[in-house]
Amino acid sequence: MSSTSSRMSDSRDIWGRRAAPKVEIELDGQKPGLVSSYTTGDQIHGTVTVSVEHDTRFDDIEIIFQGISHTTVERAACPGRTGSKQMFLKLRQPIQPDEYPTPRVLETNQLYKFPFTFVVPDRLLPHVCTHETCNAQIHQSHTMLPPTLGDPMISGNGKTLLNDMAPDMVRIAYVIRASVLARSTTDNGRLKTLANVGKKIRIIPYTEEAPPIPILDNANYWLKKEKSVKRGFLRSKLGRMTASSTQPNPVQLLPPDCDQRVSTVANVKLRFDPVSDEQPPMLGSLVSRLRVNTFYSATPWEDFPSQSGSVPFSHIGQGLFTETVPLSTMCVASAKWKKHSTADVERRDSVDSTFSEASSQALSQGSTASSSTFYTASLVIPINLPDTKAFVPTFHTCLISRIYALDLSLSYHTPQANILTPTISLRLPIQITTPPKYANAVKTSLDVLVTEAELNEFFRPRSIAPLMHEAVVDVSPPPDYSETIVRPLPAFS
């Protein structure tokens, strides 16, 4: 009799494992075949539906919104890999006891629906970044919400899946996860998972412009280049060409369902100092490219990552993946050179001179040319991001960073033929940001940023009559905001 009971118990266990609860997650406004995209302040509404093929006892339904980053780094010292995983976001949907069936048994042929609402936060909890940092700005950057990255199933423009130019070793994912839990009768009453389902979503958070990158201590950017201009190969020198620029304004990403193009401009100033009375060279074409740099590490970054350093990344558990995106090739032969006299520049006030800043800088550094005249030209280069790639805003986390650089290469022609067309190149830091979706800021005359809603509230007529009755406001408790940190994993082979 006991053996028969044991076999029946085993049969029920096998049937229970085979007939796990069926869990489905539906998002409001979900488009078929595409991953839903959200930004800062968006409300994520949806419903979790649970059904079973036989009566199933349970204790809890867990619905969470989580963000996880994962990196894998190839080790150079010995074969193998090392990696890290961090859960930087975990929001929990509270379910009231009266929303569960009584008793807590899921019955056959019944559908149990549990609605949920999550709001995409603008920042993470401070405890997400607990490692040592060089300054407070690093900690502030690491507690900003990062975008979805490295997932081949993201929707690039709301219609087509595009490549976000992240390596296979990097992943930032956001998931709505629903689980059916029951307490074990043998393992000290611990909760065990009967069913677990996740649904991916895409997050592109609001990202504001960061302070300009300090260029003086960064050898990866070239905001100024000087080059000798020769008549031809192994011939005498005509003069010296100088190209300079500044960090362009950031490129703002628009919502996925917007068909407008995002763009900014880069301003390049040219100066030619002839040896005697030579004319400036004829300009050719200007080629612009965008360098997409993805930094990743097995241990948290203590500073903003950079390509500079004597130790290779692979020796210290770090990696860098770079992809170059062609932007445009434009002819600038029509740009006009303007002639200047060094004597006039010295006498002219810097405020009234169009090229006073560049000219006075060159004079203070000491020009190698002996001529008393020089020529200047100015180029405006539009920067348009192609719609064949999925771009994410510039960001920095404890394990992953994405930064961009703009490569500009200008060709010119000298009187005699050259074997190779001479060029002069610049590399400028450039940021990609995303504007806020709900806070349309207005800058007042006092340089204070306020929103239109705040302005409307400020100028709305108010009553100063005494209150006739006491208002009763029903305030529901906010969703539980819990946070979990997964420490860097040890090296694994």
Image (spheres, grey):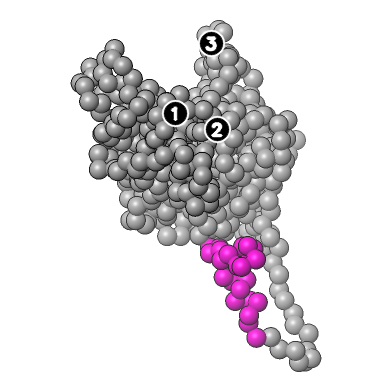
- 131, above or below 31, in the image: above
Instruction: Determine if the magenta segment contains residue 447.
Output: yes
Q: Residues within 10 Å of mark 2 (few under 14, many from 20)?
A: few
Question: Label 3 to label 1, Cα distance in Å?
Answer: 35 Å
Q: Is residue 93 left or right of residue 436?
A: right
Q: Amino acid at mark 3?
A: Ala
Q: Amino acid at mark 2?
A: Ser
Instruction: Determine if the magenta segment contains residue 151.
Output: no
- Residue 332 seen from this side: yes
Whole-percent x and y of residue 40?
55, 54
What residue range appears in magenta? Answer: 438-461
Looking at the image, tell me whether mark 3 or mark 2 is earlier in sequence order: 3
User: Mark 1 — residue?
Assistant: 225
- Which quarter of the rendering shows the N terminus? top right
Looking at the image, tell me whether mark 1 or mark 2 is earlier in sequence order: 1
User: Mark 2 — residue?
Assistant: 364
User: Mark 3 — residue?
Assistant: 76
Residue 493, which numbered label?
none
